[in-house]
Image (cartoon, rainbow, N blue to C red):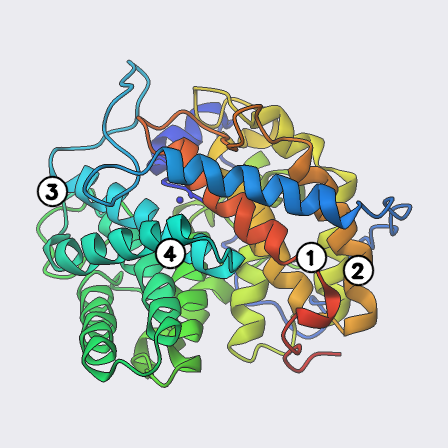
Amino acid sequence: MNALWLPLTGWIALCCWQEPDKTPPASAPSSEETKIIRPIPKPQPAKPLPPKALDDAILKGINYLLQHQNGDGSFGTAELTKALNIYAPVPGAHDAFRAAVTSMCITALIETGDPRSEVREAIERAEKWLMDELPKVKRATPDAIYNVWAHAYSIQALAKMYTRIPDDQERQKKIGDLIRMQFDFLDRFESVDGGWGYYDFKIGSKKPAVDSTPFTTAAVLVAFKDAKNIGFEPPEKLVQRGVASIVRQRLPDFSYLYGEYLKWVPQHGINKPGGSLGRSQSCNVALRLWGDNKVTNEVIMNWLNRLITNNIWLDIGRKRPVPHESYYAVAGYFYYFGHYYAALCIEQLPAQERAFYQNHLAAIIMSKQEQNGCWWDYPLYNYHFCYGTAFALMTLQRCKNVENSPPATKGK
């Protein structure tokens, strides 16, 4: 929402840059360039958290969502407005925000496996809302394409919903139709260059002429993999073009450009490791899932080490109401987004390597939980409490048990 979440348009990200130089555009790295330029030393081990403390934090987060579900079953509202809220033309932008956040909450509640009847009822109400309202989510205006977030995160929720009640064939058919519908929407709103962004200021083109942003594209590709894992093959051309767009924006140290429009200034702060800290995790796991053998275990661990050691750069930006005003132009909404995809990165490692990073990640996330049980990183109308909590729950769930982690995909 990593984002998500809903990062601002390029010109806002550029508010703190210096006059650009004439550095050539970033291109796909050669085999020589993919060597890690500066390996980050492994931090000291984190003290393992008592399982009960982890379970209690998850329970408090679940209870927060139960207490803040809307009457119609959705999560998040357009309330709590402020002068600094991002551009969000009504009603389409908020339809997209609510669908994305509701999808994330469905996924989080299903993944936690809480057996209580009130949790099951909350899931069922949210699923009904999503199945009824998701087909209505459209592009808000010619320039605002926030709906890509709703299409991406709804695919992840629909994949969980599909397997939750496996013996209901009629329900599964409806869910399958909705997944294919999201594929169609993501085809329609794909950038002409491949990948996805969320603003298109080159109004007039039939297909969005937006410069893709690698973290948005990564979120879509991760969702595509979830769909593929339950038997719904995403369009191959979208996968290939999305992967290529991320690779184009990858720098030699596996930092990633904020967006393709910044290719002429690869050393702008937001493109450096400190600025990429909340985005590299998503890009690395997306490329790994779709077979990029340059994202090795070494690359994943190096960036997890960065995340742990240099977490302060993300934390300083957390809760700031002005996007990109922090060091390295970090925006608050990358905090829980970045840690969630870090948890997915951990799942790609050999089993014996995971506990070290799970302990660190759990300690970081649990230290940020609010007294009322929620997590939040950026004030976004009234969506941030629920999306932050959903991201945190999905992250902590992946820190609970090494043996329950899925097998890693191929990597050295």
Give the left or right position of residue 405, taking residue 28 as reference: right
* Quadrant (top left, top right, bottom left, bottom right) of the N terminus: top left
Q: Which of marks 1 and 4 is in front?
A: 4
Q: How far apart are marks 3 and 2 (CA)?
A: 45 Å
- Of the residues under marks 3 and 4, which one precedes in the sequence? 4
Q: Nearer the viewer, residue 212 or 335?
A: 335
| Chain-order first, disc 3 or disc 2 | 3
Disc 3 residue type (three-letter): Thr
Q: What residue type is labelled 2?
A: Ala
Q: How crowded is mark 1: few (under 14 residues within 10 Å), some or many (20 or more)?
A: some
Q: Is mark 2 on a helix, strand or loop?
A: helix
205 on left or right of 397: left
Whether tag 3 and tag 2 are in contact, CB under 8 A, the answer is no
Q: Mark 1 points at which residue?
A: 400
The disc label shown at residue 355, or none: 2
Q: Residue 120 carries which label?
A: 4
323 displayed left or right of 134? right
Question: Residue 146: where, in percent of width, then height?
Answer: 25, 46
Mark closest to the chain's N terminus, 1 or 4: 4
